[in-house]
Image (cartoon, rainbow, N blue to C red):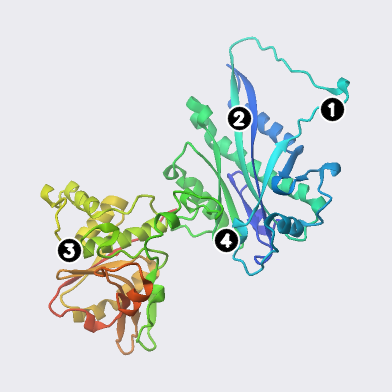
Amino acid sequence: MADTSRSEQVDRNLPFYLNEFEDLKTFVCLRIRGALNYNNILSADSSQSELLSEQFDKIFNDSQNLNFVIKKINLIISNSRELSGQNFQNCSEIYEKYHNKTLQPDESVQDKLSNYIPIDLFKEVTVQDNPEQRYSPQFINHKGICRIQAFKIPIDCLVLVDPQTKIENLAEIILEKLNQHLQSVKNCYKSYYQQYLKNESNFKAETFHFYTNQDFLITCVYPNTFQDDSLVNLRKEIHSSLDLQSDRPILRRVDAFQFSKESNPSDVTQQFSKYLTNPHLSAKPSNVKNGKQSLVKGNYLYFHYMQDNFNDNGWGCAYRSFQTIFSWFRLQNYTTKSIPTHRDIQKALVDMGDKQKEFIGSSKWIGSMEISFCLNQMLNVDCKILSVSKGSELVEKARELQYHFETEGTPVMIGGGVLAHTIVGVDFDELTGDVQFLILDPHYTGGEDIKTITTKGWVAWKDMKFWSENSYYNMCCPIRPKGV
């Protein structure tokens, strides 16, 4: 697809590039994958930067001689006319032949990306029929100390094309995007390779694709030898270059688009499929008329009594609320840590000195303060505590809760007496003072049946009568980390 002004504004020295959608309803995704392998002879006085520059000059030159094959339909795409597929007129026909179906304009962007056409790349190495034109091995004589430096560059390049793109134009379009990809790989090497020369054979430039629900796809090339925490400054530069939000993670490895064809054990949708996600979306409507609703932002999992074959009935409600809050940070990719168990939570409180050793493995309650301690200990997340002396005073905190959901968007744990709940929304009419709270009740002991949970009020809007006049309430409001 043709580059637009946004692509032209991209910093060409950073290891990323864009694919822009000309039409979100109709495009074909081509996924080019393979590897380019090179060996260099390095002398003791070789300049690493010069060698990198020379190596990538060779790679760019060689890329013009690459061919591309779609194995399933026996199609070779090449700048050479005799190798081009004469049986196809355009990309729409290739798509229909490969997937055995027509393009569906009503498919989501995610589905269109997942229904990509895989293309393997390979270099032309065929020997000519004329014996006089055959090549012989090449020997290089070098005096002095030298070593072989291996370059293995994995390629994973997406090309978004209009379905009506002519087959004879496809090779040129692919090569243009592939050169953008190679430039990003080169930038990755320039920025990070020399920092890892002690074990250069382990260095690899890894590709990650990100779809952010905008009109473009972002492809980043990250060094495998650097963890996400070491790439914060790079992500900040990319966020700034694309005018992305700078207060939340969008381009961490775990944020990368997951193609549905691929089974990824780290995919959170597979890990947590046994839990309900965002059950509040199925709750009955609030009864507040003319109120302003402020809701949790993002995804979370609903945790409650008796899950995972663990009997915490009667004492584990705050633990379950904590797990719901923790899941929000997990699903928003602020962390890759597993959801803590009751024992993990208890051990964290013992390790920080808040509880004695015998607390581990017990059935003792915890409250909002312990929740805030654990969030800080496990995720380095700070919390704001809102307190009222009785249930009827919660109306006085409605505005603060609205502000919390609008600015932070995290679930709120509320503890009063021996009960804990999770608040994921508030509906408040400032003129009448009428207010309802959207509650996840962790005291539910049944299965993951959304109909039962919502019709029986385990996830529902609750008015002021829900709260006790005899209980002091603390609300733990997690502050979302501001960073990329």
Report whether residue 9 is seen.
no
Mark 3 or mark 4, earlier in chain: 4
Q: Secondary structure at mark 3?
A: loop
Tell me if label 1 and label 4 are in contact, CB under 8 Å: no
Q: Secondary structure at mark 1?
A: loop
Residue type beneath disc 1 = Gln
Q: Secondary structure at mark 2?
A: strand
User: Which residue corresponds to the image point at 39% horizontal and 79% vertical from the top-left?
Assistant: 293
Q: Residues within 10 Å of mark 4 (few under 14, many from 20)?
A: some
Mark 1 or mark 2, earlier in chain: 1
According to the image, label 2 marks what residue? 151
Is label 1 or label 2 in front?
Answer: 1
According to the image, label 1 marks what residue? 128
Q: Secondary structure at mark 4?
A: helix
Q: Is residue 225 above or below residue 94?
A: above
In this picture, residue 288 sits left or right of residue 99: left
Residue type beneath disc 2 = Phe
The image shows residue 323 at horizontal and vertical percentages of: 29, 59
Mark 3 or mark 2, earlier in chain: 2
